[in-house]
Image (cartoon, rainbow, N blue to C red):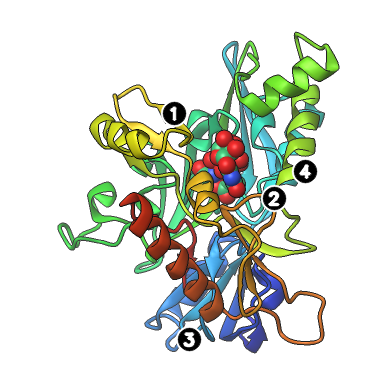
């Protein structure tokens, strides 16, 4: 096992923030995790699991041992009359995996094309886009318990998926220290996901109904799109609206879309008739955070080298990539995020919750 010291993390986070890992170990299998855990020095040390780095803000050098997940492999596990079950190693790039499933004739992930990050990170925040969330296509995952090296498998219920949320984002309440009830425990910093399996239902049914997709259908005149057609449209839409992290550092949507009660929404609409909102099945209302931020005049604004993307106010960007300097610091990103939170709160009475993990 190779322990790399003082490793630059700029290439490993999509914000391209400059920071170092004091120690970094590349994990290519479950055995590698067990080797780390049984090591006299690394075993007891705090650990930080790094996937594609697409949902983190680094605010300084990382002192816990960084476990960079590089478990690879993609395969069809099973085909039944009702579904394809496909599996990918946690280190596989998410978009490449989506592309591969379509090439193999296993459709169902096309609405989630071009989401940055790795397969292993996708269940952590239950990624989603254009009407499909990971939990709608999830079968199960394998992980290693970082306390004792035990391998375990979780189904969807055990992952406790919510909107950009799962058991992996919540810390342990300390309720059951024997590890028997992982769902109640919360698995933040306790599990390293190694493989994820997806259930892609047969027959395939297109998920449409999003304004951007409807527009593509109307423009093209295609009324019964194939999975490949939807994949292409999603890629086009995302390339137009969202910055490519290879070119402009970012972590996708920086804030979650907040949910309010119908009464709160009525109150806001009375003051702000144009507010973009969606009614949810449970009677609550989701507000478009991008609209709230935009309405407060943040589009295009900056704090140091951290800025609000010109074409989508929900995305914070690193304006310094490719310039002579080091680009935005995590501190600048968080100062900008806090200023946005304050101004949205003062105008609308809503506290926006950040999506990425602050490290
Ligand atoms: N809007 C504005 N100004 C802005 C941005 C948005 O007025 O600067 C308005 C838009 O006009 C639209 C509404 O807000 O009416 C919603 O915008 P959009 O359709 O772009 O979607 P979103 O709510 O901003 C969410 C997800 C994205 C996902 C898209 C499509 C969250 C936090 N974000 O964005 O996910 O791709 O829907 O499904 O739920 C991510 O999580 O990183 C991400 C990119």
- Tell us which disc is closer to us: 4 or 3: 4
Q: Counting other residues with Cα less than 10 Å from the Cα at mark 3, is it few (<14), some (14-19), or many (20 or more)? A: some
The label on residue 311 is 2
* Residue that label 4 marks: 240
Per the rendering, the mark at residue 63 is 3
Q: CA distance from mark 4 to mark 3?
A: 37 Å
Instruction: Quote the CA–CA distance across marks 3 and 1.
Output: 42 Å
Residue 189 in the image: above or below residue 351: below
First in sequence, mark 1 or 2: give its number: 1
Q: Is mark 2 within 8 Å of ligand 1?
A: yes
Q: Please say if the residues under marks 1 and 2 sit with CB atoms less than 8 Å apart.
A: no
Residue 228's image quarter? top right
Q: Marks 2 and 4, Cα distance to the nearest angstrom?
A: 9 Å
**In front of the other: 262 or 206:** 262
Q: Is residue 29 left or right of residue 150?
A: right
Percent x, y of residue 42: 46, 83
- Disc 4, SS: helix
């Amino acid at each position: 096992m190779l322990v790399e010291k003082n490793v630059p993390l700029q290439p490993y986070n999509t914000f391209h923030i400059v920071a170092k890992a004091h120690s970094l170990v590349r994990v290519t299998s479950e055995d590698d995790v067990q080797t780390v855990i049984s090591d006299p020095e690394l075993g007891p040390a705090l650990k930080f699991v790094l996937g594609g780095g697409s949902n983190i803000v680094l605010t300084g050098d990382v002192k816990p041992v960084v476990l960079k997940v590089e478990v690879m492999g993609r395969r069809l596990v099973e085909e039944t009359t009702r579904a394809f079950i496909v599996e990918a190693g946690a280190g596989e790039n998410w978009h490449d995996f989506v592309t591969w499933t379509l090439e193999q004739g296993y459709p169902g992930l096309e609405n989630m094309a071009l989401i940055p990050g790795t397969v292993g990170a996708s269940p952590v925040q239950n990624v989603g886009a254009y009407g499909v969330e990971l939990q709608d296509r999830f079968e199960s995952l394998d992980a290693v318990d970082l306390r004792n090296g035990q391998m375990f498998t979780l189904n969807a219920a055990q992952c406790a998926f919510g909107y950009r949320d799962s058991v992996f984002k919540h810390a342990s309440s300390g309720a059951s220290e024997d590890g028997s009830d992982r769902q109640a425990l919360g698995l933040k910093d306790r599990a390293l996901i190694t493989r994820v399996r997806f259930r892609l239902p047969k027959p395939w049914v297109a998920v449409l109904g999003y304004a951007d997709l409807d527009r593509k259908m109307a423009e093209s005149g295609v009324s019964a799109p194939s999975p490949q057609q939807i994949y292409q449209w999603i890629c086009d839409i995302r390339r137009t609206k969202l910055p490519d992290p290879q070119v402009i550092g970012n972590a996708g949507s920086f804030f979650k879309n907040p949910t309010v009660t119908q009464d709160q929404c009525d109150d806001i609409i009375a003051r702000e008739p144009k507010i973009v909102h969606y009614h949810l099945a449970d009677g609550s209302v989701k507000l478009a955070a991008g609209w709230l931020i935009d309405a407060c005049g943040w589009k295009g604004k900056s704090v140091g080298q951290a800025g609000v993307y010109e074409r989508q106010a929900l995305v914070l960007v690193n304006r310094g990539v490719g310039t002579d300097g080091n680009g935005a610091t995590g501190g600048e990103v968080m100062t900008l995020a806090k200023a946005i939170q304050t101004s949205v709160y003062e105008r609308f009475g809503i506290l926006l919750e950040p999506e990425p993990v602050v490290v």
